[in-house]
C-alpha cells in the first residue's frame, strides 16, 4: 500500500454550538453537504491509489456513530478509542504505534482532521502524491493552503521561496492581525496552516521522542496495555491520561528540522465557526443561507438554520441564527468566533445543553426527550432494523411503552412477545426488560417513565450486543 489514512475524529466543535455538542460534535454532522463531515473526509480517499482502510482516532463515546457512518460508505475502519482527548500530538502517536504494531511503520500516514471541507479532493490527492517521496525519506510533510484573503483566524506557515513541489518550512506563525495577514498575502510565501500531515509512523515517533519524550513514553504505556479482544483498540485510560496535552504543531513541527510543506489549493476550510460555514455554503441572491423551515424578510448576508420549527427573521444583516429542539443562537457574523464563550458559560453552570441535544444517539438508534418534569418523563425511541437494546432493569422508575410505528419484540422478565402499531405494555420497577426491532423498518416507541428518579444512570445491564455491560451510556 502507498498510504495509511489516519482520520482524527476527536474534538467537540464548540464554536458550532448549538448544533455541535460534546455528544454529537461537528465532524459527525451533515453541515456542509448531505454526508457528514467524517463521511466526506473518508470519501476523499477514493481519489488516492492503493490506500489502506482508514485508521480512525476517536472518543470512546463516539465509537458506534463513527463506525456506523463509515460502514455506510462500505468501509471497515480500524478504531483507536481515546479515553479522553489529549490534543493532536498524542492522538497521532496512538495511530503511529498502531501502524507499527501492524508492521507498517515505514508506510506514510496521511493525517486528516475529520471536520474540514475540501471542495476539490483531486487537488488534495495530487498534493499527497507530490509529498510521498519526501515522507518516505523521513521528512515530516504538512500541507500549506494557498491563501485567498488576509485571514486572521488561521495560523500561517512560511515556506522557502521556491516554486512548486515540496518546500522546506522556514517558520510557523500564530494567527496574525489584519495588517500582518495582508503582508503575508502580499509576500506570496506564506500559507494557511491546514493541520494535515504526511509522514511515516517511524519518522513521527522518532522525532516526537526527541521533542516530547514524556508524551511518547505515556503513549507507549497506554498502547502497550491496550485491550486486544477483537474490539476496537482501547489504550489504557490511566496511562493515557498521564500523557501531556499538545498539538502536533507545538510538540513537533515548530521545533523539528525535518518539516516540509506542499502547497495546496483545493477549496479548503476548517469550518471553525458559523461564519466560516456560511462562507462555504450555497447562498441566495441576498447572500443568505437559509436551511429548514425559514422565512426571511429584508434579511441579507445571514445564515439562518431551523432544525425543528418555523424560524422567521426581519431586517437582519450579517447575522447567524441557529435553532435546535432545545436551544437558539443569535450572533452577528463578525462575533461568530465568540460562541465558545457561551459554551464555556453554560459549562460553568453545568447545563446539559453543552453535552447533548434533545435527541441522543445510541448504537441501537436514538431517543428524543419530549418532556421531562419531576415524577415523569416522555421519550420517543427510534430503534434501527435488527437492533436490540440491552437486557436491563431500573431501580427507580417504571416504563409504559406504546408502539407507534413498526414491530417491537419485547422481553419482560421470562416473557417474550411482539407488539404491533397501536399496542402497548408496562414495565414495572425492577423488571428485566429489552426491546428488539425484528423488522426491516424503523421502530418508533413512545415511552413514558414514571418514578422518583429518572436519570440515565439508573440502568443495570445484564446483556448487551454492543459490549456496554456495566455501563450507563
Image (cartoon, helix red, strand yellow):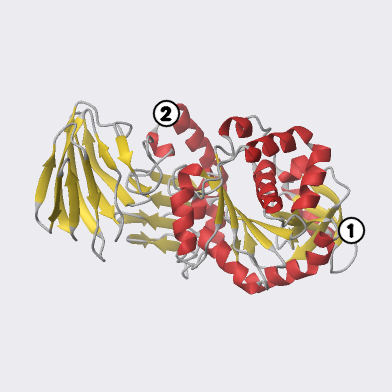
Residue 73 seen in the current view: yes
Instruction: Give how far across and how far down residue 48 sits, in percent.
Output: 66, 71
Residue 30 seen in the current view: no
Helix, strand, or loop for circle 2?
A: loop
Quarter occupied by the C terminus: top left
Is 79 above or below relative to 241? below
Q: CA distance from mark 1 to mark 2?
A: 48 Å
Instruction: Give how far across and how far down residue 167 sits, in percent.
Output: 86, 61
Residue depicted at 39% across the width and 38% down the height? 353
Circles 1 and 2: CB distance less than 8 Å?
no
Is 171 above or below relative to 284? above
Instruction: Give how far across and how far down residue 107 sits, in percent.
Output: 75, 60
Taking depth in this image into account, of 434 and 382 the one nearest to the observer is 434
Taking depth in this image into account, of 469 and 286 the one nearest to the observer is 469
Q: Which mark is residue 160?
A: 1
Instruction: Give how far across and how far down residue 227 sits, in percent.
Output: 55, 41
Taking depth in this image into account, of 18 and 182 the one nearest to the observer is 18
Q: Which mark is residue 350?
A: 2
Residue at the left extreme of this rendering: 423
Q: Which mark is residue 85?
A: none
Residue count near mark 2 (Cα–Cα under 10 Å), binned few <14, some 14–19, many ≥20? few
Relative to 404, 320 lies left or right: right
Residue depicted at 83% across the width and 66% down the height? 133
Relative to 404, 173 lies left or right: right
Amino acid at each position: 500500500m502507498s498510504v495509511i489514512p489516519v482520520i482524527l475524529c476527536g474534538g467537540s466543535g464548540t464554536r458550532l454550538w448549538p448544533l455541535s455538542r460534546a455528544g454529537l460534535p461537528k465532524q459527525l454532522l451533515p453541515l456542509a453537504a448531505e454526508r457528514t463531515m467524517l463521511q466526506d473526509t473518508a470519501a476523499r480517499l477514493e481519489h488516492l491509489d492503493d490506500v489502506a482502510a482508514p485508521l480512525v482516532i476517536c472518543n470512546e463515546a463516539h465509537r458506534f456513530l463513527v463506525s456506523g457512518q463509515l460502514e455506510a460508505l462500505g468501509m471497515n475502519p480500524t478504531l483507536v478509542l481515546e479515553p479522553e482527548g489529549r490534543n493532536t500530538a498524542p492522538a497521532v502517536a496512538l495511530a503511529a504505534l498502531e501502524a507499527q504494531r501492524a508492521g507498517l511503520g515505514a508506510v506514510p500516514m496521511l493525517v486528516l482532521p475529520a471536520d474540514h471541507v475540501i471542495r476539490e479532493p483531486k487537488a488534495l490527492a495530487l498534493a499527497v502524491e507530490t509529498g510521498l517521496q519526501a515522507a518516505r525519506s523521513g521528512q515530516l510533510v504538512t500541507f500549506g493552503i494557498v491563501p485567498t484573503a488576509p485571514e486572521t483566524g488561521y495560523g500561517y506557515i512560511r515556506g522557502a521561496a521556491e516554486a512548486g513541489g515540496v518546500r522546506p518550512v522556514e517558520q510557523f506563525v500564530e494567527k496574525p492581525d489584519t495588517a500582518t495577514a495582508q503582508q503575508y498575502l502580499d509576500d506570496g510565501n506564506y500559507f494557511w496552516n491546514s493541520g494535515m500531515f504526511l509522514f511515516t509512523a517511524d519518522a513521527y515517533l522518532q522525532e516526537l521522542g526527541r521533542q516530547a519524550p514524556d508524551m511518547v513514553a505515556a503513549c507507549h504505556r497506554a498502547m502497550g496495555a491496550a485491550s486486544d479482544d477483537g474490539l476496537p483498540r482501547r489504550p489504557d485510560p490511566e496511562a493515557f491520561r498521564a500523557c501531556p496535552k499538545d498539538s502536533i504543531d507545538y510538540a513537533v513541527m515548530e521545533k523539528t528540522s525535518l518539516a516540509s510543506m506542499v502547497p495546496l489549493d483545493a477549496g479548503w476550510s476548517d469550518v471553525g465557526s458559523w461564519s466560516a460555514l456560511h462562507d462555504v455554503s450555497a447562498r441566495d441572491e441576498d447572500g443568505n443561507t437559509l436551511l429548514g423551515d425559514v422565512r426571511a424578510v429584508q434579511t441579507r448576508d445571514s445564515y439562518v438554520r431551523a432544525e425543528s420549527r418555523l424560524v422567521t427573521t426581519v431586517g437582519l444583516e450579517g447575522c447567524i441564527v441557529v435553532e435546535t429542539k432545545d436551544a437558539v443562537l443569535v450572533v452577528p457574523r463578525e462575533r461568530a468566533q465568540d460562541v465558545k464563550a457561551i459554551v464555556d458559560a453554560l459549562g460553568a453552570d453545568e447545563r446539559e445543553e453543552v453535552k447533548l441535544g434533545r435527541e441522543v444517539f445510541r448504537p441501537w438508534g436514538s431517543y428524543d426527550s419530549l418532556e421531562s418534569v419531576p415524577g415523569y418523563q416522555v421519550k420517543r425511541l427510534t430503534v434501527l432494523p435488527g437492533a436490540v437494546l440491552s437486557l436491563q432493569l431500573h431501580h427507580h422508575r417504571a416504563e409504559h411503552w406504546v408502539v407507534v410505528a413498526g414491530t417491537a419484540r419485547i422481553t419482560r422478565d421470562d416473557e417474550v412477545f411482539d407488539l404491533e402499531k397501536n399496542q402497548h405494555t408496562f414495565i414495572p420497577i425492577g423488571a428485566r426488560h429489552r426491546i428488539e426491532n425484528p423488522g426491516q423498518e424503523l421502530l418508533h416507541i413512545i415511552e413514558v417513565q414514571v418514578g422518583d428518579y429518572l436519570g440515565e444512570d439508573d440502568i443495570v445491564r445484564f446483556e448487551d450486543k454492543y459490549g456496554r455491560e456495566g455501563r450507563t451510556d
